[in-house]
Amino acid sequence: MVRKGFHVSFGESWRADHDSRKGMGMIRKATLKDVKEIQRLIKQYSTRGDILPRSLVDLYDHLRDFFVFIENRKVVGICALHICWEDLAEVRSLAVEEGARKKGIGAKLVRACLKEAKALGAKRVFALTYRPDFFEKLNFNLVDKSVLPHKIWADCLKCVKFPDCDEVAMVRKLV
């Protein structure tokens, strides 16, 4: 199936139809060799309070959640799809290297997560974010945090901003 520049076949790499030497890259599921690069990107953003920090143990435990964007043989973007409940998933840990931002990499990573969520049977995907305008462009809608199950707040205990969270909740229904 070809869709917006991506060759998508569940179980294979999610490849951009462009040559990575020309500044375009590919999306694929993360592998063990990507974990330290994933952690590097997460640290870059978590020290500023933009995303939650993740330990190496946590990253290895949830490696299958992650997609990576590879450009010039380097991980320049990451995003995870975390299954929360029988019909609910979360897009989390979205990060793109500063020098690679504003190229649509983040949107491509979120779309890969949405495609996987749909393939797994999720009916809704949510994100907790400081950038609602980004998610609005991807057809997420602002919702009150109280509509999300309490189970999702377990990770919030790790946040330096807990209990005074200033992120907004956004949900996209999958049909």
Image: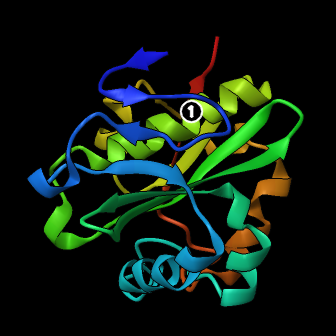
Residue at which label 1 appears: 114
- Outermost residue, top side: 175
- Which quadrant, please, contains the C terminus? top right
Residue at 36% x, 84% y is: 44
Please state if 103 lies on the left or on the right of 37 as rendered: left
The image shows residue 173, relative to residue 59, as above or below, that is: above
Q: What x and y, as percent, mark residue 113?
A: 56, 40
Residue at 19% x, 59% y is: 101
Q: What x and y, as percent, mark residue 69?
A: 39, 56
What amino acid is found at the position of numbered circle 1 in the picture?
A: Leu
Q: Residues within 10 Å of mark 1 (few under 14, many from 20)?
A: many
Q: Nearer the viewer, residue 82 or 71?
A: 71
The image shows residue 154, relative to residue 18, as above or below, that is: below
Q: Nearer the viewer, residue 79 or 3?
A: 3
Q: What x and y, as percent, mark residue 136?
A: 36, 31
Residue at 36% x, 60% y is: 70
Q: What x and y, as percent, mark residue 172?
A: 56, 27
Count how many numbered circles sit on residues in the image: 1
Please state if 20 lies on the left or on the right of 59 as rendered: left
**Color style of the picture:** rainbow
Residue at 53% x, 44% y is: 13
Q: What SS does tag 1 mark?
A: helix
Q: Quadrant of residue 148?
A: top right
Q: Nearer the viewer, residue 38 or 149?
A: 38
- Outermost residue, left side: 22
Q: Nearer the viewer, residue 40 or 87?
A: 40
